[in-house]
Image (cartoon, rainbow, N blue to C red):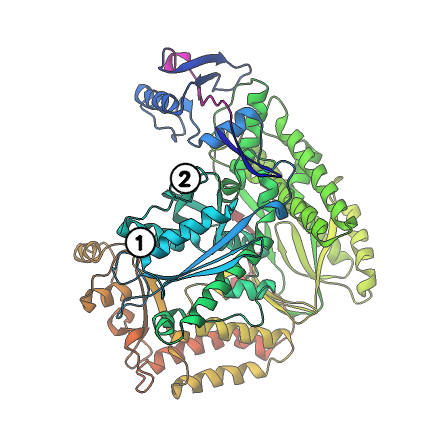
């Protein structure tokens, strides 16, 4: 295994012996395998009791194939009698106990952000690297050492631009390459264009080329398919993915676009350059310097966003047996499994097989009031599920070593220590370091519960997970009951916290006293803390609400407010309506609705606010065949692509709007390409879009007529909704 170690004189390269391994349930599967170094029987009751080590990675792969052939089970099958980890770096870290970044802080990393700008062939809405004319015209680069540069496609050909990009990366020698949507756009584009020109993207520290492979990432309920890239000796960080991982917990990002995130985090420079993506070709012709400034600013913003979102994963890479890049791309349950496996292999103990199980009941979710509440407190149980597991001794039945509770208790103690050090830090850098550690350990600690119901977890235990959720529901009910006894009005409960209006006699200084009066109703080891105070809360549905803080900032939570199925103008109108309700200006909501209706009537709404974008996931011929076979419904995007006569490719995006007259129309029959919209002769379907405005008015009208906080309507009030895990 080649190791890269930072020293005062630069990067030192070391080579360490590495014996790849494979776990098996039966000795016969591996005895006599080519390249076998040793075959050891592990102690304990686990199913995978034979540890085989090999002299080379190719020998380990051959043994894996041998096991597949002998058992008739693939390595990912739940009942496979063998277990093989396909990542050699992960294997090395597991078997040696080593982790990354020993003795380093996040500031010690040398990070280089990259952003490309491309032109799109006339007649298409979005770029596609497969089209000859859709070339790269700028590469913005910025690193953590203050370096900033743009490789200009107006001064060199694309092949020369690609070679120059490689030269600079090797010269700057970063530990980490960063980009916003770098996996699904920039690197795919660079790879395709370099292949077209026969240019090698030799970015590796050993001179090797950029390598890509198909992968997928699960983020909450969403699965992202993407092409994962690796560079020898360097990690690749995608801030677009990090933003989505961050938003699972925070749920307050306005979008996952670079500019919106930069503004949200306050890292957008006042003088940064903005260019409409549809105007890249025009900017290149008429104002190339402006376009290059835009590319440079994109790279700088990516670097700054990464400084906010990456540190927790840097801290995790110092703890878990995954490299930095994998620490971001692997799920939390997989990290818990890796920590347990490292502990068992270190003790030469057999590894259990994952247990089958059914769905696990979720947390207690209940809507008690709808409307606008003010003021509102959010009381949160500190690490509810981990605290319950430790207090009640809930652990996997297969963990005979007791590694699960030992690791959980250790991580909890480390997090408490990091939090204490953060509060006592003397400098901003020191505070940031300990804050990242605290956040990282919080993420891992909270993952231990989810791991119990992780289908691929070797120490999973669905019964134990159900015991945790059952006890958790009891804790939240006890908090709700006690708050009611004290005169508080509970608005909503969500898994491990409660939103409520405090009793009139409890002004802000007495809020902590109120929680102290709730605490005796809770089991030992459970701690309730005041998470946040809000000036107002708009409760719409269970898990769908908006919050107004003391600085006037509005946070929307829930898919009903932020669905990607909404047109941009709908999202804007919803945000405006909610802002008015939260600030006590309910009568102005009707004025806002009327203004949008009037703007559509007089065609004052720009096309980008009512256009919809669709990505082509398959070829046009595949689409036509499914339509002929009745296997799918017509799609506006595909119908437009088929009618255009142009060679659209899978992955292309089509932006369209609805033309004609009438609110009830078949969209696929009335859709037109955005490029066909003429501001001098607009033809959007006014009645269709006005109907969408009225739909939003219908959703919120009742809250403008009666602003009082009230019990939810019966049809929207499951007294306690138990979500599936």
Q: Is residue 673 shown left or right of residue 555?
A: left
The magenta-colored residue range is 15-31
Whole-percent x and y of residue 687? 35, 82
Q: CA distance from mark 1 to mark 2?
A: 20 Å
Image: 216 above or below 584: above
- Residue 360 appears anywhere in the view: no
Whole-percent x and y of residue 228? 40, 45
Helix, strand or loop at label 1? It is helix
Image: 701 above or below 178: below
Q: Nearer the viewer, residue 348 or 287?
A: 287
Q: Is residue 292 shown left or right of residue 93?
A: left
Helix, strand or loop at label 2? It is loop
Q: Is residue 457 shown left or right of residue 676?
A: right
- Residue 717 appears anywhere in the view: yes
Residue 23 belongs to the span the image colors magenta: yes
Of the image marks 1 and 2, the number of the one nearer the N terminus: 1
Q: Which callout, 1 or 2, points to the residue nearer the camera?
A: 2
Q: Quadrant of residue 515?
A: bottom right
Residue identifier under label 2: 207
Image: 284 above or below 21: below
Residue identifier under label 1: 193
């Amino acid at each position: 295994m080649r190791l890269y170690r930072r020293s005062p004189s630069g990067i030192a390269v070391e080579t360490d012996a590495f014996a790849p391994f494979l776990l098996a349930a039966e000795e016969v599967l591996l005895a006599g395998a080519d390249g076998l170094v040793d075959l050891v029987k592990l102690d304990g009751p686990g199913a995978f009791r034979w540890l085989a080590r090999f002299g080379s990675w190719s020998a380990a792969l051959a043994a894996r194939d041998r096991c597949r052939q002998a058992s008739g089970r693939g390595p990912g099958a739940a009942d496979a009698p063998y277990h093989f980890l396909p990542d050699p770096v992960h294997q090395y870290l597991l078997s040696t106990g080593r982790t990354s970044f020993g003795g380093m802080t996040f500031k010690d990393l040398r990070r280089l952000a990259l952003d490309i700008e491309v032109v799109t062939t006339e007649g298409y809405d979005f770029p596609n690297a497969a089209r000859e004319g859709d070339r790269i015209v700028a590469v913005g680069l910025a690193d953590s050492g203050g370096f900033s540069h743009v490789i200009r496609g107006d001064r060199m050909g694309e092949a020369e631009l690609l070679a120059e990009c490689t030269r600079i990366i090797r010269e700057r020698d970063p530990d980490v390459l960063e980009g916003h949507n770098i996996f699904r756009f920039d690197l795919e584009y660079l790879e395709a264009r370099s292949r077209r020109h026969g240019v090698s993207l030799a970015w590796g520290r050993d001179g090797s080329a950029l390598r890509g492979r198909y992968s997928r990432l699960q983020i909450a309920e969403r699965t992202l398919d993407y092409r994962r890239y690796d560079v020898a000796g360097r990690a690749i960080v995608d801030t677009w993915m990090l933003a989505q991982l961050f938003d699972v917990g925070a749920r307050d990002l306005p979008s996952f676009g670079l500019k919106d995130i930069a503004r949200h985090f306050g890292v957008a420079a006042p003088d940064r350059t903005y260019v409409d993506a549809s105007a890249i070709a025009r900017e290149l012709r008429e104002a190339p310097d402006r376009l290059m400034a835009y590319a440079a600013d994109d790279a700088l913003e990516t670097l700054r966003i990464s400084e906010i979102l990456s540190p927790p994963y840097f801290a995790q890479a110092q703890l878990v047996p995954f490299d930095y890049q994998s620490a971001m791309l692997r799920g939390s349950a997989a990290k818990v499994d890796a920590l347990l496996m490292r502990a068992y292999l270190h003790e030469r103990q057999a590894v259990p097989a994952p247990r089958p199980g059914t769905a696990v009941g979720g947390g207690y979710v209940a809507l008690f009031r709808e409307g606008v509440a003010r003021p509102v407190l959010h009381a949160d149980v500190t690490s509810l599920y981990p605290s319950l597991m430790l207090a009640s001794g809930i652990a996997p039945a297969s963990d005979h070593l007791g590694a699960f509770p030992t690791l959980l208790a250790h991580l909890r103690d480390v997090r408490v220590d990091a939090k204490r050090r953060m509060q006592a830090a003397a400098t901003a850098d020191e505070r940031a370091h300990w804050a990242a550690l605290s956040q990282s350990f919080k993420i891992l600690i909270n993952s231990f519960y989810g791991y119990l119901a992780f289908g691929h977890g070797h120490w999973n235990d669905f019964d134990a997970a159900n015991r945790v959720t059952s006890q958790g529901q009891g804790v939240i009910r006890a908090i709700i009951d006690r708050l009611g006894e004290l005169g508080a009005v509970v608005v909503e409960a969500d898994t491990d916290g409660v939103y409520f209006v405090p009793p009139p006699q409890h002004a802000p200084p007495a809020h902590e006293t109120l929680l102290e009066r709730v605490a005796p109703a809770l089991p030992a080891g459970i701690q309730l803390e005041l998470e946040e105070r809000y000036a107002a809360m708009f409760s719409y549905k269970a898990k769908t609400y908006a919050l107004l803080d003391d600085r006037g900032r509005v946070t929307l939570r829930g898919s009903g407010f932020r669905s990607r199925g909404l047109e941009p103008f709908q999202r804007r109108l919803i945000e405006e309506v909610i802002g008015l309700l939260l600030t006590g200006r309910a009568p102005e909501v009707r004025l806002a609705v009327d203004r949008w209706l009037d703007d559509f009537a007089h065609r004052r709404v720009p096309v980008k606010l009512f256009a919809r974008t669709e990505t082509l996931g398959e070829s046009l011929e595949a689409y036509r065949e499914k339509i002929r076979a009745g296997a799918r419904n017509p799609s506006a995007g595909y119908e437009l692509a088929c009618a255009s006569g142009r060679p659209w490719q899978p992955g292309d995006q089509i932006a369209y709007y609805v033309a004609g007259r009438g609110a009830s129309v078949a969209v696929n029959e009335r859709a037109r390409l955005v490029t066909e919209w003429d501001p001098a002769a607009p033809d959007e379907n006014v009645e269709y879009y006005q109907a969408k405005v009225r739909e939003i008015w219908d959703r919120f009208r009742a809250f403008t007529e009666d602003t009082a906080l009230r019990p939810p309507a019966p049809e929207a009030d499951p007294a306690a909704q138990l979500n599936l895990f």
